[in-house]
Image (cartoon, grey):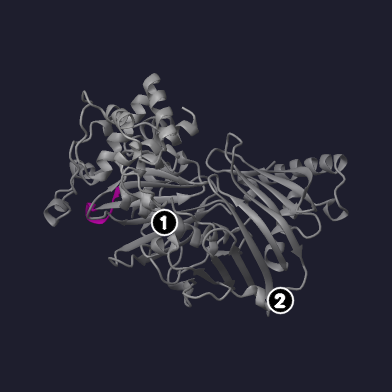
Amino acid sequence: MTPAMRSIVVGALALSIAAAEVSAAPAAAGRTTDEWLEFMNRAFVERNYDGVFSYFDGADLSTLRVVHSIVDGVQRERLIHLNGAPREIIRRGDDVTCVLQPGDEMLALEASIPSGPFARAFARSLEGVTEHYELILQGADRIANRTTTVLELSPRDHDRYGYRLWLDDDTGLLLRSELIDMAGARLEIFQFAHVAIDEPIAAANLEPDSRDGTVTNHLTLAPSQATTSPGTSRWHAAWVPKGFAMAAWDLRRTPATRAPVNTLMYSDGLAAFTVFIEDMPEAGAATFVSRSGATVAVTHMTSGPDERPFLVTVVGELPVDTAQRVARSIAFQ
Amino acid sequence: MSSQLKESLSAAIDGEADQFELRRVLDEVGRDPQLRASWQRYHAIGALIRGDGRVRPPTAVSPLDRLRAGIDGSASATEALASSHRSRVGRLAGAGVAAMVALGIVIGFGDFSTAPLEDERAIAEASLPIMGIPASVRRAPDVIEAPDLSAPALAAADAARRTADLRPFPTESDMVRSQAYMLMHAHHMALSRPPGPTSLVKVAAFESR
């Protein structure tokens, strides 16, 4: 039996047990784990919703409002940070705009990272997810006063984290998620406190608030996306966890020095990490590990063309050991 | 060591503890050898990061002794430690690195390049002891200097140069680079296809530390 078939059988068994034990809404009954994932994915893109949610990254708790709608076939989304300095993120299709206030810490950081359009989108695909995660239906729960079905994605190895998803029975919308490490600790929590689904969204609710002195930063895809393609980068990871593949790569330049930075993006369909490769800074660098919530950053030094020293930084939602192993495997062909 | 004690220790070293908290930490440091070792280690890190340049061996008058003297001799001992309030970004500089270590934002440093790929145990042991410093780093040179990356030096690529480019401890520029790449990773996720419900969240909720 293939892992995928085994997963389907296990999922079906779990579903039958859950259905027997729990009084799920009629819409939830009979869905397999795969169908729940598909249901969730469609809801992300197709549903209108307007709600307030909390996001805990292991250190900080943020409260945000999200407004999502499809306008003339284009996905529109507005995310408003409700605490601290006003900060909004606006999506219009592939164009993402960060609306910030002067003095926002993000501005200082963005000034030091490569800017400009991204050559390729970071492609996600849930196909094959069951090979690397065991999908289990965990029964019913109530989130934001709505009935949900809980789907657990438990990693089959120690190179990725697990997920627990609370999916709205009627619409499939994700109402709560947890990112979980091998010890069962919750690294990140996302949860709606209130959400209105499939109700009309006023156009004004998709536009940013106008404030004096706002600063915007656009994250966009380049018009000609095919300038590069996976496999053409001469940098690569000689080792990545099973199921991870290069989803995109890009060559950009830092604003200050115009120094090239290779970026390689890998994903297993759910988890993702990005590898940044640059010439060793003239002032040198330290190899170290830092963490922000579930996101870890590992730096490592390697040799590149002409035996020149290069600095490798691996950033992603990965266990530290795994990120280190990826960093040490980065090589130039 | 409890996380609360770590934070208090860090605050004391960063000069941000009030007198009550400072005295409590000093009492604990006096009782607990492990805590005393952490205290000395954080001061060593702070000295390196601030560019004092030299890690001094323990002397008869240690930072702990000076601090005790300060408490006994003035109304506000923390003033002696330049306790101006720093923003979270400001914490990237100076002895704030001790705070970042204590808070688990920096969870290890040192060269982990020598462990064989196949030996996961070696990776774990050789690389990043949480709250600890590898032996190789403890033997770091007293004075930190910017490595020579001139053309002749690059031409002489060898194992010695590989280590010469590496600093034993992260500095402010290292931390800013790391944070900036975390933000850029969040940007990548925001442009993922198909976009997920939380793909923009990491950008919107991004906090530099």
Inspect the magenta stretch and tell me whether residue A304 lies in it.
yes
Relative to the observer, which residue lies in front, B175 or B38?
Answer: B38
Q: Quick one: SS at disc 1?
A: helix
Q: Is residue A200 left or right of residue A222?
A: right
* Residue B70: quadrant of the picture: top left
Mark 1, chain letter?
B
A209 falls in the magenta region? no
- Quadrant location of the N terminus of chain A in the rendered image: top right
| B93 in relation to B125, above or below | below
| Residue at numbered disc 1 | B181
> The C terminus of chain A is located in which quarter?
bottom left
Q: Is the residue B7 above or below the residue A235 in the image?
A: above
Element carrying mark 2: loop
The residue that appears at 46% across and 41% down in the rendered structure is A320
Q: Nearer the viewer, residue B26 or B93?
A: B26
Identity of the amino acid at label 2?
Answer: Ala
Q: Which residue is mark 2?
A: A202
Residue B107 occupies quadrant: top left
Depicted B197 relative to depicted A130: above or below: below
Disc 2 versus disc 1: nearer the observer: 2
Where is residue A27 drawn, in percent x and y?
A: 85, 56
Q: Does the image show residue A233?
A: no
Q: Which residues are magenta?
A: A302-308
Residue A311 visible in the snapshot: yes
